[in-house]
């Protein structure tokens, strides 16, 4: 594999996106070559999915795919488009979204203790994936009730089965639907006692909702309208970090960067998040950083 000379400019805009940005650095190229040697690209282009069986295969698969394979499959047929729509494999994304609860239990202990220290109410996870996060928190904040909402019906149905098997159906309710604030409230909201919701949390999703909508503050304002008694927010997301080149960012991942470049879903800076929080009257109580890029912020008001 021949090393690629870095660009002398910063690819900060979609117009600067070049093939060198895609393959910059030997690590990304070696992952691609290894997957080709294993026959993965032939399998994927044939319409099938890969099935990693060893530790090293799982590592390469995570670096290359991360559940975004359906997005990248659109590339061959879309050279004339400015962006392609974001598409994901729901099961893979669900596992990735709740991995934080398994990998960094101390972060969820901090969230759970903050919830448990207040008056018992209802905590809602907006974009709950496979409910792994609410299951983790239910074991810490034993007096709290939990709601989970996710747009993927199949993921929600499977999660309901697990909740029931664990005997937690009386404390955890899972609903299917969009959590993007629109002019009309989503249908699932009619099944919720909105006055009882005092904590709202969301992980790995706010940046996309803000990109599709009118920014971070607009999404948060919509959630605050849905749940007028909110006193706590828990926001877990990746921040846009400044660096001359992608590979110089602390949390560089070729797949992650390319996914956002080709879909038009943007990342937001820490300053943009904090400006939106302050605009809406939220105070940062605690910030916890995970080495895989996630920053979890616990905010309160009132």
Image: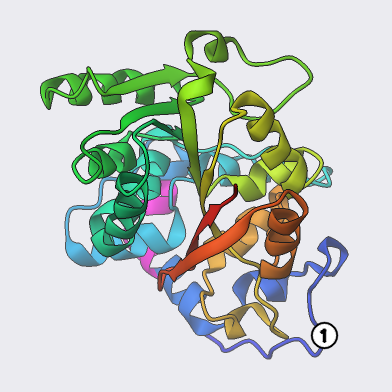
- Location of residue 247 in the rendering, given as x and y in whole percent from the top left corner: 59, 81
Q: Is 109 left or right of 177, judged from the image as shown?
A: left
> Is residue 77 at least partly visible in the picture?
no
Classify 295 as above or below 28. above
Most distant residue in the right direction: 15
Any part of residue 297 in sight: yes
Question: 147 or 144: which is nearer to us?
Answer: 144
Q: Is residue 262 left or right of residue 160?
A: right
**Residue 194 point in image, percent of width and height:** 53, 20
Q: Where is mark 1, residue-wise?
A: 9
Circle 1: element type: loop
* x 65%, y 34%: residue: 224
Residue at image position (30%, 65%) is: 59
Q: Nearer the viewer, residue 298 or 69?
A: 298
For the point 70% across and 79% down, which residue is it? 242
Camera-side residue: 88 or 149? 149
- Dot 1, crowdedness within 10 Å: few (<14), some or many (≥20)? few
Q: Indicate yes or no whether the magenta region holds residue 38.
A: yes
Please tell me which residue lies in front, 51 or 196: 196
> Does 212 lie within the magenta span?
no
Q: Quadrant of residue 171?
A: top left
Residue 53 location in percent, x, y? Answer: 18, 53
The span shown in magenta is: 34-42
Dividing the picture into quadrants, the one containing residue 275 is bottom right
- State the image coordinates of residue 218 (x, y, percent, origin top left): 77, 40
């Amino acid at each position: 594999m021949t090393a690629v000379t870095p660009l002398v400019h910063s690819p900060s805009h979609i117009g600067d996106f070049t093939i060198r940005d895609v393959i910059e650095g030997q690590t990304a190229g070696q992952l691609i070559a290894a997957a080709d040697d294993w026959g993965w690209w032939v399998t994927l282009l044939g319409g099938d999915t890969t099935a990693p069986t060893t530790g090293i295969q799982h590592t390469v698969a995570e670096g290359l795919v991360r559940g975004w394979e359906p997005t990248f499959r659109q590339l061959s047929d879309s050279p004339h488009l400015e962006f392609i729509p974001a598409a994901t494999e729901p099961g893979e994304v669900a596992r990735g979204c709740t991995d934080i609860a398994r990998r960094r239990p101390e972060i969820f202990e901090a969230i759970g203790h903050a919830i448990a220290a207040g008056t018992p109410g209802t905590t809602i996870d907006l974009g709950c994936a496979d409910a792994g996060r609410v299951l983790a928190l239910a074991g810490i904040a034993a007096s709290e009730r939990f709601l989970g909402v996710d747009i993927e019906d199949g993921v929600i149905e499977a999660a309901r089965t697990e909740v029931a098997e664990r005997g937690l159906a009386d404390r955890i309710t899972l609903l299917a639907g969009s959590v993007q604030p629109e002019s009309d409230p989503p249908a699932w909201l009619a099944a919720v006692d909105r006055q009882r919701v005092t904590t709202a949390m969301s992980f790995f999703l706010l940046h996309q909702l803000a990109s599709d909508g009118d920014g971070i503050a607009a999404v948060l304002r919509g959630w605050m309208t849905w749940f007028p008694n909110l006193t706590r927010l828990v926001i877990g997301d990746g921040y846009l970090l400044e660096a001359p080149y992608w590979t110089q960012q602390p949390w560089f991942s070729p797949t992650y960067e390319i996914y956002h470049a080709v879909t038009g879903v943007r990342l937001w800076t820490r300053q943009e998040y904090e400006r939106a929080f302050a605009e809406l009257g939220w105070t940062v109580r605690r910030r916890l950083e995970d080495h895989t890029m996630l920053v979890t912020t616990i905010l309160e008001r009132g």
